[in-house]
Amino acid sequence: MSAVAIKGWCPGALRPMQSGDGLVVRIRPHGGRLEAAQATGIAELAARHGNGLIDLTSRANLQIRGVSDVSYPPLIDGLAGLGLLDSDSDTEAQRNVLVTPFWTAGDDTPSLAAELERVLAGASLDLPTKFGFAIDDGNVRVLAGASADVRIERDRGGALLVRADGAQFGRSVTRQEAVQVALTLAEWFAAFGGANGERRRMAAHLAGGATLPDSLRGDAEPVARSADPVPGLYPVGAMVGVAFGQMPHQMLSQLAASAQALRVTPWRMMLAEGMHEMPRGSDLVTEADDPVLRVIACSGAPRCREAHADTRTLASVLARHIPAGARLHVSGCAKGCAHSGSADVTLVASGEGFDLIRRGTTRDTPVLRGLTSSYLIANPTVLTGGH
Ligand code: SF4
């Protein structure tokens, strides 16, 4: 049993979260990868014990939705049988590890992920619940835009480095040192990051004036970052998207049937290992320029009881009016569960219609208020500044 102390909590399989459609059971695939049999098993469990819907989250986790108090125990037994449970809920909560999906056989990535998970399971840390790690050790960085506090990356010469999120440089490490230095960085944050009881994240801690010790600072510059990947064929398989990060169980089992394994990503996409043709005839997002990739929408009504409106139907209709490269976020309330950051246009439902915010978040001041869905659909130019 680990002595880890987690402040607050994040949903997991062992600590499910109540939502408008029942319990949400979050699964954290080990090493960011599911064997095809595990993915098929998750789909079957979602059909039998949930409402059949599965989320793909921005932390590269899967969530089975619509679970009841009665169906939860057999669901957990099923996940245990698939090798997808941790020893306890604290260990599970601390195992926040994002993994680049683009590694190939012989790369350090899988062994770094396995070693980091093993070390974290035995660590006695005291970290904020969202604190996480990224293993982004390819020759371009693909996870730089994803949430993580401690990053294992490479420099331009191909050597590994460990970098605190928010720091420009990292410390050069050997393969043997990498995981231990990453853990030491997390321990430093745990010891010196919670000033005045704050539980902020690494980048905010450094921006607030905290200084890394010499032993963790280093002067290694990470390789360039890439834009977020898009659906398409890659050397290791086919990258496919899931509209709004939610799929019916049949979609997951069909994809698993054609792949050796599925690698999960924080971009609401999965990489189907060993697939060398894009899937056809499914509702998966397979085109890099599909307008649905330009919109983000939370669960909304009727799936979430906090929601003031149906977000996904509106987002689907408005998607084609969003220019390539721009982003529309439709939120059922001001909490902004689907996207905490800024978007080109954000629509937030309230009891009096939608508020419209430009280049901001759900918490920023709207430029227009009280817009109905039918008005927005009839006048989509209002999104881009026209009337
Ligand atoms: S943003 Fe609001 S409406 Fe949307 S899922 Fe979160 S709580 Fe529900």
Image (cartoon, rainbow, N blue to C red):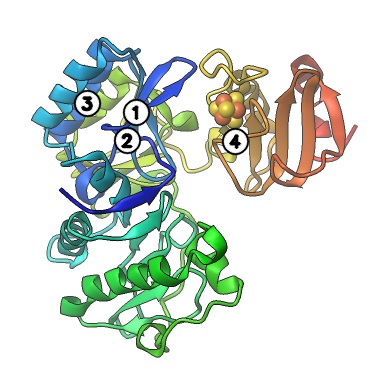
Nearest-to-viewer mark from 3 and 4: 3
Task: Identify the disc placed on residue 42.
Answer: 3
For disc 3, the neighbor class at 10 Å (few under 14, some 14 to 19, many from 20) is many
Question: Sequence order check: which comes first, mark 2 or mark 3?
Answer: 2
Which amino acid lies under the numbered mark 3 shown in the image of this protein?
Ile
Classify residue 304 by image quadrant.
top right
Q: Give the residue number, with chain letter if any, for mark 1.
A: 16
Q: Locate residue 300 relative to residue 72 in the image: left or right.
A: right
Q: Give the residue number, with chain letter if any, for mark 2.
A: 12
Q: CA distance from mark 3 to mark 4?
A: 27 Å
Which amino acid lies under the numbered mark 2 shown in the image of this protein?
Gly
Residue located 54% across and 68% down the image: 205
Vertically, is 290 above or below 194?
Answer: above
Q: Is the residue marked 1 within 8 Å of ligand 1, measured from its CB?
A: no
Q: Locate residue 376, reporting x and y percent.
A: 78, 23
Question: Sequence order check: which comes first, mark 3 or mark 4?
Answer: 3
Q: Specify the quarter for ligand 1.
A: top right
